Every structure is written in C-alpha cells, then in structure tokens.
Amino acid sequence: MDVRKVSIEEGGMPETYMVDNREYRINGIDNIKEALGFIKDWVTSIIQIQTAAIAAIGTFVGLSGFPKLSVVETLLIALTVICFTVSIINGGMLLHMLPGCVQRVPHNEPAQDADVYGMAPFGQGTIYRRANWFWYSFFAAIISFALFIIVRIIFARS
C-alpha cells in the first residue's frame, strides 16, 4: 500500500493524500464530534469485553475443581490479566480525553490537516498515542491467552 501526501504543486488538492492511486482529502474540521463518538463506542465495547474476560479468568482459575496450573500457564494467565488491565487503564484515559477534544476546534493549518487521532487535550498526549497503548495491550492479552490455551492443550496431552 503506497501512502503519500500530495502537495498543490503536484496537482493535488490541499490537504490530500494518496493510497494506491486513490486520492483522499483530509478534513480536520467537520465531523469531529461524530469521529470522537466512534472512538468512544469502540473503546467502551472493548473495555466491556476485557472486563468480562478478567472476570471469567478469575472465576475459572478460582474454581475448586480447576486443575492446577504449571508455572508457564500461571505466567501466561498473569500476563493476560496485566495486559487487559493496562488496556482498560489506557481506554479509561482515552475516554477521559474525549470531552476535552470535542471542545477543541482545529485553528491552524497543521491541525486542520490532521484527523482526530492527532488531537490532544492539555498535557495528556494525543488520542493516537492512547489508542495505540489501548489496542496493542488488548492485542497482547489476546495473544497471551491464546498461548495459554496452546500450552494447556500440550500439557493436557502429556
């Protein structure tokens, strides 16, 4: 996928970029509230899934009939819960940022050329940074839990 910003000198419109011979215009002024609403819905949904996953892990591991875990399995479950927790914290911080972002209107050209991921309330970093921490820690938890299942299957056979 070829992505590059097109300047006016190259025959492009202001605030455009190319992806695989398709030109898109960036509009950092309109639909800010709607875009932030999509982020809110996405974060809220993932946090609900993570909270349920932590509760399920705690319930199953805490059952008296649940087989003992090996050291590797214990580490993978602990890593899973830690990654979910880091993701939930970053998701909460991301949700905390959204009201401040709704109140901001891009004023100069660089702000108008950016999308909502570039917005940043005072002293909190950008939405992009928080969203990355949120997503990658969620993804790490999923990978860790998948590895736990694989290890569990391997140890169950031996």
Image (cartoon, helix red, strand yellow):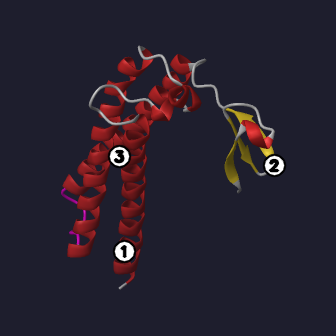
Q: Position of residue 91 (x, y in %)?
A: 35, 36
Mark 3, Cα crowd under 10 Å, few <14 / some 14-19 / many 20+, is some
Query: Is residue 32 depicted above or below 131 in this figure?
Result: above
Q: Which residue is mark 2?
A: 21
* Amino acid type, callout 2: Asn
Left or right of residue 40, residue 112 in this image: right
Q: What SS does tag 1 mark?
A: helix
Residue 42 visible from this viewpoint: no
Q: What SS does tag 3 mark?
A: helix
Say which quadrant the C terminus sits in.
bottom left
Q: CA distance from mark 1 to mark 2?
A: 45 Å
Q: Residue at x 41, y 52 (%)?
A: 136
Query: Is residue 5 depicted above or below 155 in this figure?
Result: above
Q: Which residues are magenta?
A: 63-69
The earlier-in-sequence mark between 2 and 3 is 2
Q: Nearer the viewer, residue 86 or 104?
A: 104
Q: Position of residue 103 (x, y in %)?
A: 41, 14
Specify the label residue 53 is tagged with.
Answer: 3
Q: Which residue is mark 1?
A: 151
Q: CA distance from mark 1 to mark 3?
A: 19 Å
Q: Nearer the viewer, residue 38 or 72?
A: 38
* Amino acid type, callout 1: Val
Q: Position of residue 40 (x, y in %)?
A: 45, 27
* Amino acid type, callout 3: Ala
Magenta highlight on residue 92: no
